[in-house]
Amino acid sequence: MTDTKALIEDTVTSNDVVLYMKGTKMMPQCGFSSRVAGVLNFMGVDFVDVNVLADEAVRQGIKDYSDWPTIPQLYVKGEFVGGCDIITEMTLSGELDQLFDAKGVAYNKDAAEQIRAANA
C-alpha cells in the first residue's frame, strides 16, 4: 500500500464525514467544491475537508482510491457517497438526510428542509 493510499484510507475511516475538495470548507476554490461544502456547512455537518490542491499525490490518489474521476468526493463513515451532482440530487430528494440518519451523522434537519424549499 502506498503512503498516499494509506493516508487516504486512514482519513476516510477515522472521520465520520470527509470531503475531498479543491480548497477548504471556508475557502472553496471551485464551484463544485463550493456547492458541496456549502450544503454540508449549511446543514451543520461536522466534516473534515481535505484540500487536494495542496498535494498532487492526494489529488490523483483520491481519484484512484474511489475509481471516480472528479473532485469533490464525499465520504460518510468510510464509504464513498459521490461528487457534486450526486450530493446535490441526494440533498434535494432527502436521500442525504436518510444516509446521515442511517449512519448516525448529526445534521440540522430544518436546514435540510430549507434547502429543499428554496429549490422547489
Image: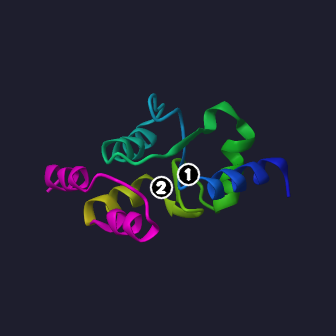
Q: Is residue 115 magenta?
A: yes
Circle 1: element type: loop
Q: Position of residue 87 (x, y in %)?
A: 39, 57
Q: Position of residue 72 (x, y in %)?
A: 51, 48
- Residue drawn where x is 29% and y is 52% of the image: 108
Q: Nearer the viewer, residue 19 or 47?
A: 47
Q: Quadrant of the N terminus?
A: bottom right
Query: Which numbered tag is attached to residue 27?
Result: none
Q: Residues within 10 Å of mark 2 (few under 14, many from 20)?
A: many
What amino acid type should be assigned to the residue bearing mark 2?
Gly
What amino acid type should be assigned to the residue bearing mark 1?
Thr
Q: Is residue 77 left or right of residue 30?
A: right
What range of the chain is rendered magenta?
A: 94-120
Q: Position of residue 29 (x, y in %)?
A: 48, 31
Q: Position of residue 34 (x, y in %)?
A: 41, 38
Please give the residue where the numbered disc 2 appears in the rendered image: 83
Tell me: residue 36, above or below residue 13.
above
Q: Residues within 10 Å of mark 1 (few under 14, many from 20)?
A: some
Q: Earlier in the sequence, mark 1 or mark 2?
A: 1
Query: Which numbered tag is attached to residue 70?
Result: 1
- Residue drawn where x is 64% and y is 54% of the image: 14
Q: Quadrant of residue 105?
A: bottom left
Q: Is residue 52 left or right of residue 36?
A: right
Coloring scheme used: rainbow
- Kindly check if marks 1 and 2 are in contact, taking CB atoms under 8 A apart as contact: yes
